[in-house]
Amino acid sequence: MLRQYELVDRVLEYDPDADEALLNRAYVFSVNAHGTQKRASGDPYFSHPIEVAGILTELHLDDETIATAILHDTVEDTVATSDQIRQVFGDNVARLVDGVTKLSKIEAQTESERAAENLRKFLLAMSGDIRVLLVKLADRLHNMRTLHFIKNPDKRKRIARETMDIYAPLAERIGMYEFMKEMQTLAFAQLEPEAYESITRRLEQLKTGGGDRIAKIASGLTLLLSRHGVDVEVMGREKHPYSIWRKMQERHISFEQLSDIMAFRAIVKTEEDCYTALGHIHRRWPMVPGRFKDYISTPKRNGYRSLHTSVIHAENQRVEIQIRTEEMHAEAEFGLAAHWAYKQGARVSPQTQHSWIADLVEILDTAGSPEELLEHTRIAMYQDRIFAFTPKGELIQLPKGATPIDFAYAVHTDLGDQAVGAKVNGRVVPLRTPIENGDQVQVLRSKAQTPQPNWLGFAITGKALAAIRRHLRGVEREQTIALGRKLYDDIVARLPAPLGSDAVSHALTRLKLIDEAALMQAIARRTLTDAQVMEALMPGSAGADVAHAPPQSSAISIDGLAPGVAYQLGECCNAVPGDRIVGLRRPDASIEVHRIDCPTLTELADRSDDETDWLDVQWGNETEGATARIAVEVKNEPGALGVLATIIGQHKANIINLRLDTRDTQFHTNVIDVEVHDAHQLMRLLAALRAADAVNAAERV
């Protein structure tokens, strides 16, 4: 563990103007706060935050970030409070410590909710100050370095999986490739120990058998470029085990079939030297087609710049070479952290937020569920990128497989909402057309356009998917409220007296609803019965209209079963009185009742191994009704849902549940569960629906 003076000296070495007193106070405060706490390794707990701070000194980060690293676990794991941190260390350090603390708190929720909430806090905290992320990544890196001390193998695997899924990609997204590689290697050793052991053993064998092959190739590159006047430093290495394993999985090849396991970096003085060196390398050795990438003219989204090429070296050996300047190399190793490093007597911080972080923060406001949040953020962080251009030449980076709708939302949310088509390289194409690297894309828009449900079938970016789903949820909410309003008017019409001016507000209080919109949605979704709404609006009125209240359960009798035998109606076909039915006695003795044309029966009849008994049953005389499911395709026009509700009400049927299934510019399909007395009533209802101008089709599901 670093001693106090060693840590402070490290910072002063690259930042002579650092606040030495701040660092000393933080060191002493952390040691005292953690006291006798121990880590799984048996070391004092305060050794962990000190080592995290040490990792960040290697990046030459400012004194506030180092102090935050030293203090990052005090609020969560000791009796220290945020107010104490603020009083002793000031507002900036307190804010940063609070941000890191929030990232570490995982509430007792379901697995997906816990992961989503943790990620939500993570993104919000790092969007406020990226130093929060830098501290958290260093914290996770040190935890991975000491992961082997944890005795529980399941816990080790869980931490390793979280590192591989969340933290390593985040490190890559901000350009901290050394952090990413070490995290991936350590996580890989836990998740795939046999593969890790096999690859590392073979790499060691290559080193032993190949002698100083890497040194020879590096020396040859240096000699070649120096002869042509290029001042260069060449470094060579084998690719790390996880990178090799991933290529083996992607290409479905063995270790022996891999030909590019060596990578070299040529560090030159100027950008012009990068291209000069590239030319000499390509003249000396054949280039591998399709393996050249120019990240200098078109940097990666995280700001990474370099030239990448692969050549066929001696003995048909593929060799990957990266060519960059010293400044590019520093940014490639430490990414966004390089912007926070102490430079020439000033602390330099980025004034502009990385666009991908801004996109993720926007997704936070639009995700409808924990699962959506996780899906969209992982899409935004993990997918490989392509480059496309606006008509004005602005570079837009997108995931592979992106379409013009993704491009439109990447430019601006309003442009995505109003997109009707696109021109790719001057040719009009549908919105579902995949964009290729280097395409020029012009989005065609119309103010009359709105996001369409079928866009979800070909949009792939998290930002686009989140925006489309947000709009569709709003449309569905409006339609549900409209239907609820129609049903509400019918309920009010049955009340024994006119409503008072405060009746609705009192009803909302009794039903514990926030506003009228929530009431209308509850009525439309049948989470409230008519009787409950009447009673809330006018206490004592429900008894006057009992006949209209929907029954809580259907009393359906079935002849052909022994008295008292329990059964259930099959949800696959929703049989109602009047349908021809058959009973099925399952091997577990349960009995199901199905329509005679139910697909379940056909499936069972085709199976020779089925042990189900078929029972001859029919409807009894004491039937009060049952629930049927219908699909109604209505025109996408104002009042259509009102017509639907009116027809159903006129035929004495009761809406139990309504769900918007599909929607496009002309029609939308609603799946409705209706309570009817028998099949004859249902047939009359379907006929009336089909006869309505607003209805295009109505079928029983």
Image (cartoon, rainbow, N blue to C red):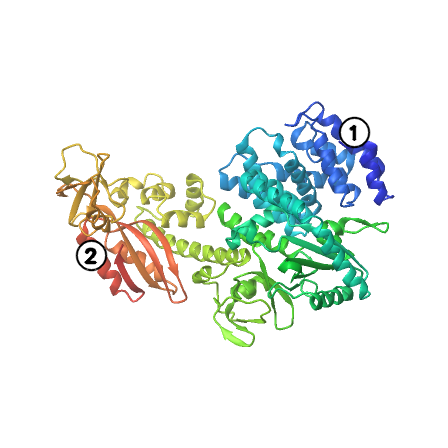
Query: Percent x, y for residue 249?
Result: 52, 51
Residue assigned mark 1: 28
- Mark 2 secondary-structure assignment: helix
40 to 54, vertically: above or below:
above
Q: Residues within 10 Å of mark 2 (few under 14, many from 20)?
A: few
Q: Looking at the image, which is closer to me, 6 or 184?
A: 184
Front one among 530 and 106: 106
- Above or below: residue 522 compared with residue 299: above
Please identify the quadrant where the C terminus is shown. Answer: bottom left
Residue shown at 82% from the left, 39% from the top = 10
Q: Position of residue 252 (x, y in %)?
A: 50, 53
- Ranked by sequence position, the earlier of labels 1 and 2 is 1
Residue lying furthest bottom in this view? Answer: 426
- Answer whether labels 1 and 2 touch (C-beta < 8 Å): no
Q: Quadrant of the N terminus?
A: top right
As drawn, the residue found furthest toward the top would be 36
State the SS at label 1. helix
Residue 386 against residue 488 in the figure, above or below: below
Asked which quadrant contains residue 395, the reply is bottom right
**How far is the residue under mark 1 from the one under mark 2?**
81 Å
> Which residue in the protein does label 2 denote?
683
Nearer to me, 269 or 500 = 269
Residue type highlighted by circle 2: Met
* Crowd rating for badge 1 (residues with CA inside 10 Å; few <14, some 14–19, many 20+): few
Query: Which residue sits at x=69%, y=67%?
Result: 282
Q: Nearer the viewer, residue 429 or 469?
A: 429
| Camera-nearest label, 1 or 2 | 1
